[in-house]
Amino acid sequence: MKFNTVLDKHYHPFIVELSAFSAGVAKEGHAFSARIAVSGGGNVYAYPLDLYAEGHEEENYRMIERLTKALLWIVGGHRVYLYAPEYVVARMKREYAPDGVRHKDAEMMARVFESDFEIVACAAPSDVPETTRKSLQLGGHLDGCRIGFDAGGSDRKVSAVVDGETVYSEEVVWNPKTTADWHYHYDGILAAMKSAAAKMPRVDAIGVSSAGIYVNNRAMLASLFRMIPADDFDAHIKDIYLNVAKEIGAPIEVANDGDVTALAGSMSLGENGILGIAMGTSEAGGYINTDGGINGWLNELAFVPVDLSAEAGYDEAADDIGVGAQYFSQDGVIKLAGYAGITFPEGMAPAEKLKVVQKMMEDGSPVAAQIYEDIGTYLGYATAFYSLFYQINHLIILGRVTSGRGGDLLLARAQKVLDEEYPELGVKISMPNEKMRRVGQSIAAASLPLIGK
C-alpha cells in the first residue's frame, strides 16, 4: 500500500486487504475454492474466492461475509448461494437471520425484491449458479416535449426540454428526508411537474432521477422517504411517481439518480463504461456499461464496504461499519474534520459543517487540504475495489463534496493512487465538464423515456 490516509489512522482498504488475503492463501499452496452468488430480479452474479483450507476461520468468514455484503448492494438479490466450509455457511445463516447482526440487509433485500431472503448452502461448486449478463437501454432520447425531474435530498430540480433544448428550469429547496407527511412529497413533486408542463405546448414524456431503488418505476427503498411510516409508504409512496404521471397525463420513466449521473456523463463524453459517483448527503452510484446500457443492478454504493478496519465509522442507515456513505459524503468530510481536531458549533447541520471546511479550503488551510487528500486516497482504493465488479473506463465524480478547490485536490489524489497502484485498470477520473453541466441531471432524466413506448 503506497498511499496512506494521514488523518484516518485506522483505514484498511478492502481491495488491499482482499489482495493480501488471496496472497496468503496462495502462499500456503492449497485452498478451498469457495463460490458466492447473489440472485434476484432476473440477475445472478457469481464470485469465486479461494479460502484457507484449514485454520484462519475468522479471516475466511470475514472475507466471505464482506464480499457477500458488497454483492448484495452492488448487484442486489434476495437469495445468496454459498459453496463454502460448513462453519462459514452456518454463521452466514445466523448473521443474516431475523435476529442476526446482518438482519437489516436481509430485510431490505426482501423488501426490494418482494421475496423472502435466504442463504442457500450448496454441496458442490456446480450448485452455485453462473453469472448472467444483461444490458438494458437507458435514456438518451431528447425528441419531443419532455419533463426532467431530479429529486435530491436538499433540493428538487425540474426542466422543460423541447427537442433537446431546455426552455425552462427551476430549483426549489425542500426537506424530504425529515418530513413524515406523504402529502408534502406528492404535492412538491406534482408542483414541480406542473411548473415545467406550463412552459410547453404539451407533455410527451416525463423522466425522473431519484435517490433510491426503483423497480418498474416504483419506489422500493429510498432515503428521500425515510420518515414516511411503513403503511403510508406502501399506500402512497411506492407508486408516487406513477400517480403524478397520471395526473400530468404522460408516460414516465424513473431511474436511480446514480444511473442518471452516469448517463449524463456518457451523453456528454460520448463514452461508455462509465461509473458515476455523487458525493453529497450520502454516496450515490450509477453505471453505464460498455454496451451503453445498464446492468439492472442496484448500484447502492453507499452500503458497500470499502474499509475493513475494526475501527471504521458506523453508518446508521446501513447498520454497519466501513461502508461508502461514511467516506464519500459530507459525513466523510465531517469525520475527517473531527480527526483533525476541527470543532463545530453545537447544533450545526451537516451541510453547514461541510461549508465550514470548504471555506477553510478556500482560505488555504493545510488541514482542510489534508481532509480532501485523504478522501482522494479513499476514492482511489475504493475505485480499484469497484473495478472487480464494473469495467470502468471513466469515473465521474460530482456532488457538493467535490465543489471548489477541495474537489480538484480530491480528484488529483485519487487519480495518483490509481495510476501508481493500479495502472493496469486505465481508469480516468473527471468532474463534469461544461457540456455535462449543460446536459445536467434533470435534462439527462428527461431523456429517459422512449416516446411511443
Image (cartoon, grey):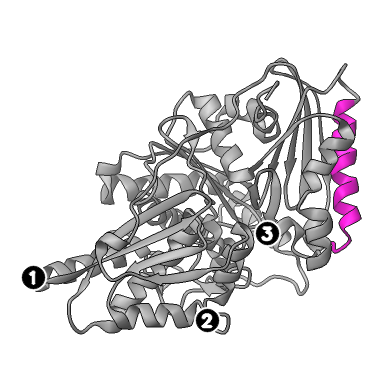
Q: Which residue is mark 2?
A: 101
Precedes in sequence: disc 2 or disc 3: 2
Q: Relative to 304, does residue 392 appear above or below in the rendering?
A: above
Q: Residue at x 41, y 73 (%)?
A: 9
SS at circle 2? loop
Q: Which residue is mark 1?
A: 29
Q: Residue at x 47, y 64 (%)?
A: 79
Q: Which residue is mark 3?
A: 356
Position of 212 compared to 370: left or right?
Answer: right
Precedes in sequence: disc 1 or disc 2: 1
Magenta segment: does it hold 183? Answer: yes
Q: Nearer the viewer, mark 3 or mark 1?
A: 1
**Of the pair 275 and 231, the residue shown nearer to us:** 231
* Quadrant of the snapshot with the N terminus: bottom left
- The residue segment tinted magenta is 179-197
SS at circle 3? helix
SS at circle 1? loop
Q: Amino acid at mark 2?
A: Val
